[in-house]
Image (cartoon, rainbow, N blue to C red):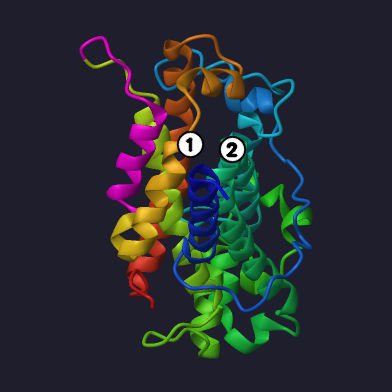
Amino acid sequence: MGVKSKAAAAILVLLLFLGSLWLQGGLDYHWDSCLKGYNQVNTLHQLYNSSGADGAEGPQVREGCPGQTFQVSLLLSHLLAASAETSDVLLQPYLASWDELVKFMEALGPMVGLISKEIESKTSIIRQLALLADGNPEAELGPEINSINSMSTEAGTKNDEEASQYNAAYHSVRSMILVELKRGVVDFQHQTDSGCRTLLRLHRALLWLKLFLEKLGETPVAGRLRSPSELCREAYQSTLANHHTWFVRRAAELAFIAMPERGFFYRLVCVQSQEELSTLLKTVVQSIGEVYDRTQKALDENGMLDLP
């Protein structure tokens, strides 16, 4: 085997290892995503063509980007649905948002795509926990769960049929936190596969992607647009790297080297210029930010930002 072949094999081994450790901790099981079929409940014209607070039209987003598996319009629709309830995040559209973000990562090539496999495993854990939460959690947990699940906006009420696919205990981030604390399945000292710990790992990864997309939408500095590889590495170093070992951080650096150039991202979301990309990504980042901030607050209020 030549030197180049050995180097390529070594890189592949490192990236496979990275995929298994990316969100801290390997998984003991992998479940099918039984509830992956989240149905859109918001029409796209309401989301993209509505007027903003200043009366200006919102960014025009194509409902479908031909030839792309990842669809930014679907991502935005799921994110909007996830934040439909007051001060809470609905889990079903939240996980559907991750389904689309996984497609985004896989579109960036096999090196980055390896990372998405661990994220898929994390979303599968929460979905499976929702399916296994049988019985009558409302009776077990008392009126608190009813209070949380009744804080719906008009938009959230329209989603009752779709939301009923999830057990009421896993209806939202706050209801999941409540039920898992009541049942004593959240361990603040040792690693568990609780929904709360799993959500925290997804939450950290969401901040990384949010920051990367924010940087990708930046306008040129001194006439120069920095490479996506550089931006992704920078976003990682200020977010997920804080929770990773030295070895995983080095392996991540290898994955980012293989990031495609900026023109690829134009094609991925069907825009023609950096200006159009910046406008679109601003909307995406704002939508992710709303979901992230609500999740951050719920986890912080329950002392869950440092679960092992």
Instruction: For mark 1, give the secondary structure.
Output: loop
Residue depicted at 46% across the width and 27% down the height: 281
Snapshot quadrant of residue 275 = top left
Can residue 92 be seen?
Answer: yes
Precedes in sequence: disc 2 or disc 1: 2
Tell me the tag on residue 83. none
Can residue 244 be seen?
Answer: no
Residue depicted at 77% across the width and 45% down the height: 39
Identified by mark 1, the residue type is: Ala
Q: CA distance from mark 2 to mark 1?
A: 8 Å
Q: Which residue is mark 2?
A: 109
- Tell me where residue 38 appears, x and y as whole percent: 74, 50
Q: What residue occupies the far front of the structure in this picture?
A: 1
Residue depicted at 39% across the width and 17% down the height: 54
- Is 253 drawn above or below residue 70 in the view shown? below
Instruction: Give the camera-side residue of 110 and 48.
Output: 110
| Magenta stretch encompasses residue 121 | no
Magenta-colored span: 222-240
- Tell me where residue 273 appears, x and y as whole percent: 48, 10
Q: Callout 1: 10 Å neighbours few (<14), some, many (20+)? A: some
Q: How many marks?
A: 2
Quadrant the C terminus occupies: bottom left
Q: Which residue is mark 1?
A: 258
Identified by mark 2, the residue type is: Gly
Residue 265 relative to residue 160: left or right: left
CB under 8 Å between callouts 2 and 1? Answer: yes
- Is 76 drawn above or below residue 192 in the view shown? above
- Tell me where residue 179 appears, x and y as whole percent: 56, 80
Residue 97 relative to residue 136: left or right: left
Residue depicted at 50% across the width and 28% down the height: 260
- Is 140 drawn above or below residue 127 in the view shown? below
